[in-house]
Amino acid sequence: MRTRTTTVPACVATALAALLVLTGCTASGGSPHEKGSSAAAPAPAAPGGGSGYEGPRPQDQNLLAWTGDPNDAGHVTAQSPAGVGGRITLVRIVLREQITWSNIWLGLAGIDPNAQLSQCYLGVYDAGGALRASTADISPQLMTDAVAKPLPLSKPFTAAPGTYFVALLLNGNWATNGLTLKSTGAGISVNAGLNPPNLRYSTLLTGQTSLPASVNLGEQSTSTINTGWASQWYGIS
């Protein structure tokens, strides 16, 4: 039996080759050069310089906000009743999103079992100096359990994004190195680059037995802060 051999004309072979090349480019989404460039493109860098680490967030610990990572709140604040009794101590906090503010978490580092406390409060002032909410007298909570503890506001409120000041008022008698609070940093350096009414840490007024309905933030003072009354740690839930 004789085998027939079919010869394809050169023009037809050239057309078939061109068609195959065109089909391959279309299927791959571009020319061979474009495909090679896409395959060699580096992956986007992860946040934090490639590590993917962004640091702890309040939400990691079921909080809405905080004045700093409590893991870093290692400095214990201590001050005499004569130094801070009756003064309103303010710690600034900036909210980036709207929250319902129900509790202020305070880091209680140590207690004085022989203290005589009364008329002690936590509260929240807005950037205009208006009292938005406050706790009941927290004197009993300052006498027990040296831990971080939530202290409920008498009435939760909706806090829009913006600047707020957590206010602490202490009254009574206690041992200076007995009743102590956790702190996020030294008092003097925490206000670097800031002036009233935007100090990050300050005191206002004297002789107070309750948190007034409004305060003049332009009167923020650092005189007590500079004596070593270091900035307290607070959380929000």
Image (cartoon, grey):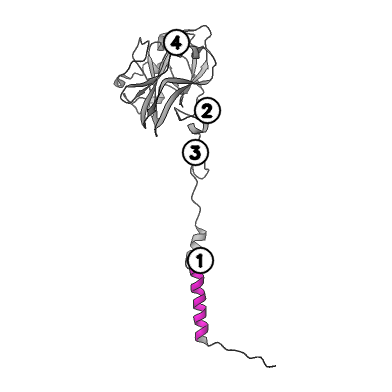
Mark 2 or 3 closer to N-term?
3
Magenta stretch prevailing secondary structure: helix
Q: Nearer the viewer, mark 3 or mark 1?
A: 1
**Mark 1 Cα within 10 Å, few/some/many (few <14, many 20+)?**
few
Helix, strand or loop status at disc 1: helix
Find out whether residue 15 is within the magenta segment.
Answer: yes
Identified at 41% across, 8% down, the residue is: 82
Residue span colored magenta: 11-29
Cα gap from disc 1 to disc 2, whole angstroms: 52 Å
The residue wearing badge 4 is 80
The residues bearing labels 3 and 4 have C-alpha atoms spaced at a distance of 38 Å
User: Disc 3 on helix, strand or loop?
Assistant: loop
Query: Is 45 or 154 nearer to us in this picture?
Result: 154
Which residue, given by chain and number where applicable, does mark 2 sit on? 71
Q: CA distance from mark 3 to mark 1?
A: 38 Å
Nearer the observer, disc 1 or disc 2? 1
Q: Amino acid at mark 2?
A: Asn
Give the side of residue 89 with respect to residue 32, left or right. left
Mark 1, residue position: 28
Image vertical order of residue 159 relative to residue 154, above or below: below
Q: For residue 54, which numbered disc appears in the image?
A: 3
Do the numbered discs 1 and 2 sit on residues whose CB atoms are within 8 Å? no
Answer whether residue 102 is visible to the viewer in this image: yes
Q: What residue is shown at x 39% (from left), y 33% (from top)?
A: 98
What type is the residue that disc 3 sits on? Glu
Classify mark 4: residues with Cα within 10 Å, few (<14), some (14-19) or many (20+).
some
Query: Alpha carbon of mark 1 to alpha carbon of mark 4: how far?
Result: 76 Å
> Of marks 2 and 4, which one's residue comes earlier in the chain?
2
